[in-house]
Image (spheres, rainbow, N blue to C red):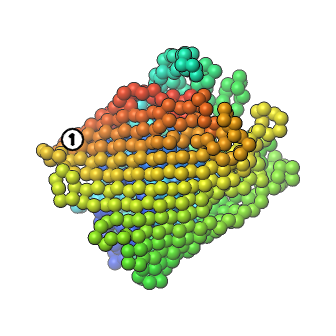
Amino acid sequence: MSFVRTYCILFILSCWQWVFPQSPQDTIYQLPDVEVVANRYKEVIPSQKLTGKELELLSSHSVADAVRYFSGVQIKDYGGVGGLKTVDIRSMGTNHMGVFYDGIQLGNAQNGQIDLGKFSLDNLEEISLYNGQKSEIFQPAKDFGSAGTIYLRTRKPSFKENKKTNMRGFFRTGSFDLVNPSVLWEQKLSESVSLSLNAEYIYSSGKYKFRYRKVFQDGSVAWDTTATRHNGDIKALRLESGLNGFIRDGSWNLKAYYYDSERGIPGAIVNNVWQRSQRQWDRNFFTQGSFRKQLLPQYDIQVNMKYARDYMHYLNPDTTLMYIDNVFIQQEIYASVANKYAVFSTWDVALSVDYQWNTLDADLQDFVYPERNTLLVALATAFEWKRFKGQASILGTYVFEDVSRKDYGQEASSSSGKPENKQEYTPAVFLSYQPFSQYNLNLRAFYKNIFRMPTFNDLYYTDIGNVALRPEYTRQYNLGFQYVTSFHRRFFKGINFSADAYYNEVTDKIIAVPKGNGQYRWMMMNLGYVEIRGIDVTGRMHGTLPYDIGWQVSVSYTYQKAQDFSDPSDNDPEAGTYGGQIAYIPWHSGSVIARFMYKKWDLNYSFIYVGERYHNSSNILQNHEQPWYTHDLTIGRSFVWNKTAGRLSAEVNNIFDQQYDVVLNYPMPGRNYKLILKVEL
């Protein structure tokens, strides 16, 4: 903790001297909810968003819980408050999803997966989900490099009247012995500069009862018992600090983030083993900054920089399996310069150049220590002609990789394999057309070809990695429409409806295959091929009921047929995988969010449905998983006491106490409760 205190003091002092010499003549005063630098074009492919009050009212604690309500998204949740939570969009795989925090991507070169359970909603202003990529050309080259993206935008300080200080606190308690306080302090340092500090602590025993049943194919029950989930405890501390400022025709921000946790890994329930003893310690730190300015009437520039260090300690003391005690340390340095030039009033071009450096240190036996240098160059254009809008881009990716053995202080021997440098060029095209000027109906389409690099684990994990792996490609085709309208009616005031049909291909998919004659020896190979066909539908409606009761309803639905065509010879109708629906992807899924508001009261109901699926591409009865669904309810009341505003709310999650697994043999909690107090000064 001394490291955190020291860093925060140095962070604030170093920025103070840089910021305050600005003259009052160069100051642009901050107005609530106003963007200093704005894009002339509306989104070609609009995003799905959850903002402000919606995030607060959802029965969600982490970002992963909130993202479940977007169409086309599947969450892998291993249970409990501290369980691993990763996101998959349109069945292309977790590693194809980019997650951006205040405009800069969160990285994990080791395994490519971002645990969204580590990020709280308390300091977030908006969550946005984009298919393909963000409809914006003035952005870093990294933003062009994923099949889908989630943008997390933190709260920027806004001060009313003559206030110079804002304070906000949350306290949550409830099931699983939950204790979860958080506090946010915002300070106005000058007319153009503000400081924010946010801290959150979470403790939970992670214990909850669940029902476990085993049913044979003939319908007979092997066992049916109720047990308690153990080793799902978590203790975590999150600290964030930020400086936000405005300059003439531009803005800047600096941010530091620290996360420290210890948690149990409850593990799968197999072979009548109900309790595991694995532990994991994480210490994640990053600092990042962004500068954006209009230098000329036609020319804008944006500069981003970041340093990150991630520490993970994994312990498995169970010698009946395999004793493991390993430490992994990742480091990342990232820098980006984006340039945008307005050729005409309706035509912009942009050039972005990014550099990224990644290393992984581990105490594994015979580990080869990798270092990766990545250069990305993106050339993009956006144009608008009458009711037609379009964007196109091409991304060049250049990867230079090296390995060494620290034991001997020299490069890896030829027997370890020498990674090849890689260069790839990937295009994307986005189009939108409004056929009728009198109706807010937009037709849209996009094509994108993109890839993801093999992770360090894929390439170098001892006795499993394969340095000859190629990138894993996706090709995306999308066709859809959006219709937005409002009505001069009291009951029904407006609707926003959209639908998209899509076809995706994932080629050179990286999968684990048996190695040699050893039954339990594996190697990573480029053998997978997946075809995905799907439909996403979303709708939002709002209005007013009698007695001035406001209402809002959001609905999402997804149909996906995601087939594994990796091995044509594996077509045995009894157990083959060829043509089967890939693991954990349901054919049907959806959600409903309904909110009702009356004076100082509000009621929020949410429903999530995940249809039948298989936990293996072999779509046989033994691998079949039943549908699951949950109903959650939140009721709250706002209040004002003296000069203190607040809100008290109560949640009931999984109202009907459904017993279900998101991932096989990882039982999820049944009915649970939460009490939340929010106070603002």
Q: Is residue 565 visible?
A: yes
Which residue is rendered at x = 41% and y = 74% of the image?
A: 388
* For residue 361, side relative to residue 344 (left or right): right
Q: Is residue 376 above or below residue 249?
A: above
Q: Nearer the viewer, residue 481 or 146?
A: 481
Which residue is rendered at x = 34% and y = 52% of the image?
A: 539
Which residue is rendered at x = 35% and y = 73% of the image?
A: 27
Q: Position of residue 282 (x, y in %)?
A: 57, 41
Mark 1 element type: strand
Report the residue marked by disc 1.
601
Q: Is residue 118 visible?
A: no
Which residue is rendered at x = 56% and y = 67% of the image?
A: 428
Q: Is residue 576 above or below residue 561?
A: above
Residue type indicated by callout 1: Trp
Q: Nearer the viewer, residue 140 or 484?
A: 484
Q: Nearer the viewer, residue 554 or 4?
A: 554
* For residue 614, side relative to residue 175 (left or right): right
Direction right: furthest residue: 414
